[in-house]
Amino acid sequence: MHKVNIAEKFSKISEYWKPYVGAELNGQMVKFDKIKGEFVWHHHDHEDELFLVVKGRFRMDYREKDADGALRDRHEWIEEGEFIVVPRGVEHRPVADEECWFLLFEPASTLNTGNVKNERTIEQLQYV
Ligand code: NI
C-alpha cells in the first residue's frame, strides 16, 4: 500500500495505445494509457468505461441510433481534468491530435478494442 504518482507512471510509458495496469480494486483496473492519432471503432458488450484525462485532450466519437433507428455520429472533446463514462454497448472511438494521457477505470476483463480483434488488440496487459 503505497501512493501512486500519476506523472511518474506515465513517464515510464513510451508506446501509444498500449494500456498499462497501475492498480486493481474490486475487480476493476486503473489503466494508464498514452494515445495519439485515431483508434478503432468498437463497443463493449458488458463493460462501462471511464476515461479521465490527465494531460492534453482527446475527442470521443460516438455512433448512436436515434429514435428512427438511423445511425448518427456525434463527438465530444474531453479536456484535461475532465472525464467521461461510455456505457456498455455504445460504439465509440477515441481520437487525439496531440499526445494525450488518460486513466481508464474498467473491469479487469475489458479488452481495449472491445468487440473487435485486430493488430491493436492487447490481450495481456503489463503493469507499470
Ligand atoms: Ni472502449
Image (tube, rainbow, N blue to C red):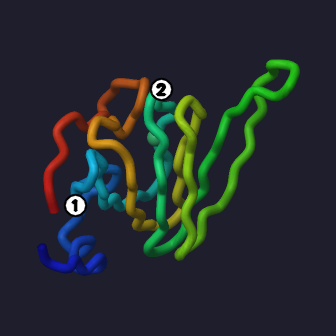
Residue 15 point in image, percent of width and height: 26, 57
Q: What residue type is labelled 2?
A: Asp
The numbered disc on residue 45 is 2
Residue 43 point in image, percent of width and height: 51, 31
In which quarter of the view is residue 33 placed? bottom left
Mark 1, residue position: 23
Whether tag 1 and tag 2 are in contact, CB under 8 A, the answer is: no
**Is 44 left, or right, of 30 in this rendering?**
right
Q: Is residue 2 above or below residue 74?
A: below
Camera sees residue 120: no
**Cα distance in 3D space between marks 1 and 2:** 23 Å
**Is 47 left, or right, of 13 in this rendering?**
right
Disc 1 residue crowd, few under 14, some 14–19, many 20+, Cα 10 Å: some
Q: Which amino acid does label 1 sit on?
A: Ala
Q: Which residue is drawn at 33% across and 35% down?
A: 111
- Between 59 and 115, the residue placed more toward the observer is 115
Q: Residue at x 41, y 25 (%)?
A: 116
**Is 92 left, or right, of 37 in this rendering?**
right
Q: Which quarter of the rendered picture does the C terminus lie within? A: bottom left
